[in-house]
Image (cartoon, rainbow, N blue to C red):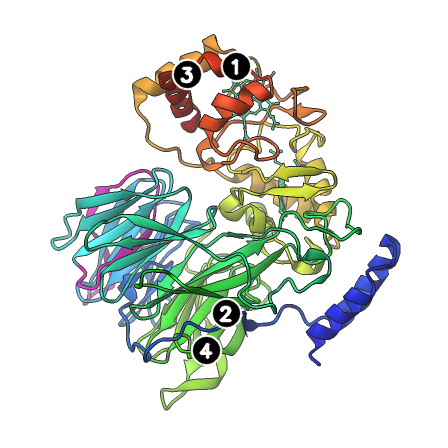
């Protein structure tokens, strides 16, 4: 019997015990528990006709791309584009913009295309062959907040996903001009994109909807939403009986997607169970109320191209999988765990005999790596981008004969650029993102698990007797105390203390809490979507003068920082800040309003904030437009 099953057997046997006894049983179990299985298919593999062979890397975007003489990386922390040699040494760098999105690389033209997320532009950068320069060849405007990026197989069309304006745009780059060809509307919070090797379709990953999109690039240009399965295809799912098998689970935080041949794509995500049904026993004061970790990590293998999109789920141990790369020659898929500092190799990835390969821990020295980019080199070895230490690590996975090796070897390069954060903020950022047993029980949850990209998973979590929605944190922390929906925590430190208690970790030292707080205060606000200025102005007037919203949502942060008793909600509700509203759906403490329009038309009246029933369609649209630009 495998240790994991033994652990679960013991856990099941201990269910009748009291809560106090449970804590004891739980500790006992932990001694046997080897953690989640490294890789396990939970259903029948999709499989391919035959391994597809070499695929161009430019069909998707990444933080890092291999070049013929090293790599090119875009560091979101400093905002620098860096060109490195084979050993990961800095050869040249160019400022693009902090929080930059992804890049892709046209190896023939030697041009890197980078998404400047805060600057709303694509920057095309030439990598000179003879000297090590980086030179801007062209740049052009995009809709607000470009992030995902990919080239067509012929490298003549560049595709970009934009977050705030929710678009998928095709640009003509046959002459690096960047003329827009067409665009399509996307759902909220899109991230990475990928194009199929035959150029007929693209996939878009989302962090907050539980879906991926498939877009027909040839004819309709229309995205088709594909729900990521939230039911394991086999009874041997992660939730196998016990206390947690009744809660609904939701797919969240899909940052990356990649094709494996024309007929199969793969994406990595989190499966979250915000309300665990505890069969009469429950863990009070925790997120979800159950005993099993409420978040597990998975891959979805998607069969694309037919009338339907069949999918199969696999369980992985990579915490917060943010980056994927497929080596078509060796048919090996690599998955990086941002929170666990590990890279998983999956062999025969596109075939029915898909199997677990080697797992490599990518922490070098004492500092956590925070891998959020992967690239495959020409020889099949792998480059890992460490976002915390800002260095490239070469992961040798191929032996001298050119076949997959039986052990991996890690060679970390030097740190390439200085962080834009202070040391203290940087420590806080690492704490925020890591799966650490100091933060949560067995390191099952990181802050960024529920606050991906410092935003919100869009789920309402069972906490004691309430369901409370995850708030976004970007730019909403300073000047908004008290904290939590009920305003129960007067200061940020109180809020962190109560969060830590819910998470059940063994606790942070005082300096660590200080670091976490200083990072939270440094997170910039989210980008807002583009809206018609006159409509926004009319909405603002309604908000400020006609509807009396400003009496509570006042000041720079749109909150009076007071607690109110509204009808049909919590005993006491802290007036929430309205900053970044467009990125924080659903709304209210319990997520009961799916959209701002729903909130204005229905729930605002229900909660007695105001009496908006007299508003006509134009007025609702104006008020919505204004709220979306806060
Ligand atoms: C399991 C999901 C989850 C995890 C993990 C999580 N949070 Fe939250 N966070 C929430 C929810 C839900 C709320 C609202 C709870 C409430 O109002 O009582 C919240 C509220 C907050 C708030 C208050 C914001 C405000 O405006 O009132 C802060 C700050 C915060 N979280 C920071 C963190 C930090 C730091 C961590 C890691 C130590 C963390 N969260 C981990 C779900 C999570
Ligand atoms: C009496 C004070 C008060 C007034 C007046 C008021 N609000 Fe609120 N507002 C609140 C409180 C408290 C909440 C949180 C309620 C809850 O979550 O259950 C809230 C929640 C919201 C939210 C949801 C925020 C989120 O992140 O989920 C929006 C949007 C909002 N209000 C907009 C408005 C608009 C528009 C008006 C004017 C039509 C208005 N409010 C008037 C106190 C007020």
Real-space CA distance between mark 2 and mark 3, rounded to the nearest whole angstrom: 48 Å
Label disc, if present, on residue 540 of the rendered structure: 3
Instruction: Check the picture and name the quadrant holding the N terminus.
Output: bottom right
Real-space CA distance between mark 3 and mark 4, rounded to the nearest whole angstrom: 56 Å
Q: Which residues are magenta?
A: 129-155
Real-space CA distance between mark 2 and mark 4, rounded to the nearest whole angstrom: 17 Å
For label 1, count other residues whose C-alpha is less than 10 Å away and answer few (under 14), some (14-19) or many (20+). Answer: some
For label 4, count other residues whose C-alpha is less than 10 Å away and answer few (under 14), some (14-19) or many (20+). Answer: some
Q: Residue furthest top?
A: 546
The residue that disc 4 covers is: 354
For label 3, count other residues whose C-alpha is less than 10 Å away and answer few (under 14), some (14-19) or many (20+). Answer: many
Residue appearing at x 52%, y 60% in the figure: 338
The residue that disc 2 covers is: 343
Asked if residue 106 lies in the magenta stretch, the reply is no
Say whether marks 3 and 1 touch (CB < 8 Å). no
The residue that disc 1 covers is: 550
Up/down of 560 relative to 438, above or below: above
Say whether marks 3 and 4 touch (CB < 8 Å). no
């Amino acid at each position: 019997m495998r240790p994991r099953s033994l652990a679960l057997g013991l856990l099941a046997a201990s269910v009748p015990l009291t809560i106090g006894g449970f804590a004891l049983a739980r500790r006992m179990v932990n001694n046997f528990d080897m953690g989640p299985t490294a890789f396990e298919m939970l259903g029948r593999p999709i499989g391919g006709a035959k391994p597809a062979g070499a695929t161009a890397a430019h069909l998707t975007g990444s933080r890092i791309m291999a070049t013929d003489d090293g790599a090119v990386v875009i560091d979101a922390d400093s905002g620098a584009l860096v060109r490195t040699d084979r050993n990961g040494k800095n050869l040249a760098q160019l400022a693009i913009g902090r929080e930059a999105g992804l890049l892709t690389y046209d190896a023939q033209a030697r041009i890197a295309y980078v998404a400047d997320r805060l600057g709303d532009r694509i920057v095309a950068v030439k990598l000179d062959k003879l000297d090590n320069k980086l030179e801007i060849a062209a740049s052009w405007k995009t809709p607000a907040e470009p992030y995902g990026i990919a080239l067509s197989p012929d490298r003549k069309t560049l595709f970009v996903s934009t977050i705030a304006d929710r678009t998928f745009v095709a640009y003509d780059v046959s002459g690096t001009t960047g003329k827009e060809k067409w665009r399509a509307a996307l759902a909220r919070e899109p991230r990475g994109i990928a194009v199929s090797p035959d150029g007929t379709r693209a996939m878009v990953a989302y962090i907050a909807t539980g879906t991926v999109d498939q877009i027909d690039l040839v004819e309709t240009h229309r995205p088709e939403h594909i729900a990521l399965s939230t039911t394991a295809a086999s009874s041997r799912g992660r939730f196998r009986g016990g206390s947690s098998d009744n809660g609904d689970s939701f797919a969240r935080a899909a940052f990356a997607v990649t094709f494996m041949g024309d007929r199969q794509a793969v994406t990595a995500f989190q499966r979250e169970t915000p309300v665990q049904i505890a069969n009469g026993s429950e863990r009070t004061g925790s997120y979800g109320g159950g005993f099993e970790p409420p978040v597990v990590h998975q891959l979805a293998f998607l069969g694309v191209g037919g009338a339907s999109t069949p999918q199969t789920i696999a369980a992985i141990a990579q915490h917060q999988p943010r980056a994927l790369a497929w080596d078509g020659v060796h048919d090996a898929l690599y998955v990086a765990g941002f929170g666990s500092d590990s890279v998983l190799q999956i062999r025969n990835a596109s075939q029915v005999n898909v199997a677990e390969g080697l797992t490599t821990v990518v922490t070098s020295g004492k500092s956590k790596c925070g891998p959020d980019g992967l690239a495959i080199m020409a020889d099949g070895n792998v480059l890992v981008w460490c976002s915390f230490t800002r260095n490239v690590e070469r992961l040798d996975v191929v032996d001298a004969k050119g076949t997959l090796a039986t052990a991996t070897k890690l060679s970390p390069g030097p740190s390439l650029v200085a962080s834009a954060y202070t040391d203290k903020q940087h420590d806080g950022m690492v704490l925020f993102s890591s799966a650490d047993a100091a933060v949560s029980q067995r390191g099952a949850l990181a802050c960024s698990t529920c606050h991906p990209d410092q935003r919100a998973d869009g789920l309402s979590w069972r906490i004691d007797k309430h369901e409370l929605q995850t708030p976004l944190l970007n730019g909403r922390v300073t000047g908004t105390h008290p904290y939590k929906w009920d305003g129960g925590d007067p200061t940020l430190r109180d809020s962190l203390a109560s969060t830590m208690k819910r998470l059940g970790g063994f606790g942070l030292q005082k300096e660590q809490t200080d670091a976490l707080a200083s990072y939270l205060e440094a997170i910039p606000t989210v980008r807002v979507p583009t809206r018609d200025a006159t409509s926004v102005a009319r909405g603002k007037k309604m908000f400020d003068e006609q509807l009396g919203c400003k009496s509570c949502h006042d000041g720079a942060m749109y909150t009076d920082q007071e607690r109110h008793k509204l009808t049909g909600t919590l005993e006491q509700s802290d007036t929430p800040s309205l900053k970044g509203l467009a990125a924080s759906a659903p709304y209210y403490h319990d997520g009961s309003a799916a959209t701002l329009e729903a909130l204005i038309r229905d729930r605002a009246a229900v909660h007695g904030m105001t009496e908006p029933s007299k508003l006509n369609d134009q007025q609702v649209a104006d008020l919505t437009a204004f709220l979306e630009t806060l």
